[in-house]
Amino acid sequence: MSGHLHGDEPTNEECADFLERIVRLIDNELEEGDCTVVRAHIDTCSPCLERYDLQRTVKAIVARSCSETAPADLRAKVRLQIQQIRVEITEG
């Protein structure tokens, strides 16, 4: 796989396995030994480092978005749309 910084390059399958483990690392769901292995891989694999950074960024944006409150006029519009859809479904 191109983009690795070391001579003993992991295969695509190994990197695919690391992607799942990277997500679990970000979520603090890995044992310490596994964290060390994943971090070592990320340190030597540019594509996996990019995936790690992307996953962290997405999680941070989602977390921030979940703590914000939508403006009152937007919430009112959404409620109106939901009511209209409910009426259409019950009449349809």
Image: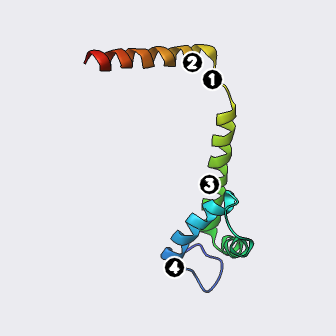
* Picture coordinates of residue 42, whole percent (x, y): 67, 70
Secondary structure under badge 4? Answer: loop
At a point 50% along the width and 17% down the height, the residue shown is: 79
Q: Which residue is mark 2?
A: 75
The amino acid type, in three-letter code, at marker 4 is Thr
Looking at the image, tell me whether mark 1 or mark 3 is earlier in sequence order: 3
- How much space separates mark 2 and mark 4, taking CA atoms? 48 Å
User: Is the residue marked by circle 2 packed among few (<14), some (14-19), or many (20+) residues within 10 Å?
Assistant: few
Query: Residue 32 appears in which quarter of the rendering?
Result: bottom right
- Of badges 1 and 4, the one in the foreground is 1
Against 56, residue 44 (above or below) is below
The numbered disc on residue 11 is 4
- Of badges 1 and 3, the one in the foreground is 1
- Of badges 2 and 3, the one in the foreground is 2
Looking at the image, tell me whether mark 3 or mark 4 is earlier in sequence order: 4
The amino acid type, in three-letter code, at marker 2 is Arg
The amino acid type, in three-letter code, at marker 3 is Gln
Residue furthest toward the front? 90
Secondary structure under badge 2? Answer: helix
Q: Which residue is mark 3?
A: 55
Looking at the image, tell me whether mark 2 or mark 4 is earlier in sequence order: 4
Question: From the image, which quarter does the C terminus lie in?
Answer: top left
Q: Which residue is mark 1?
A: 70
User: Is the residue marked by circle 3 packed among few (<14), some (14-19), or many (20+) residues within 10 Å?
Assistant: some
Looking at the image, tell me whether mark 1 or mark 2 is earlier in sequence order: 1
Against 86, residue 61 (above or below) is below
| Tags 1 and 2 touching, CB below 8 Å | yes
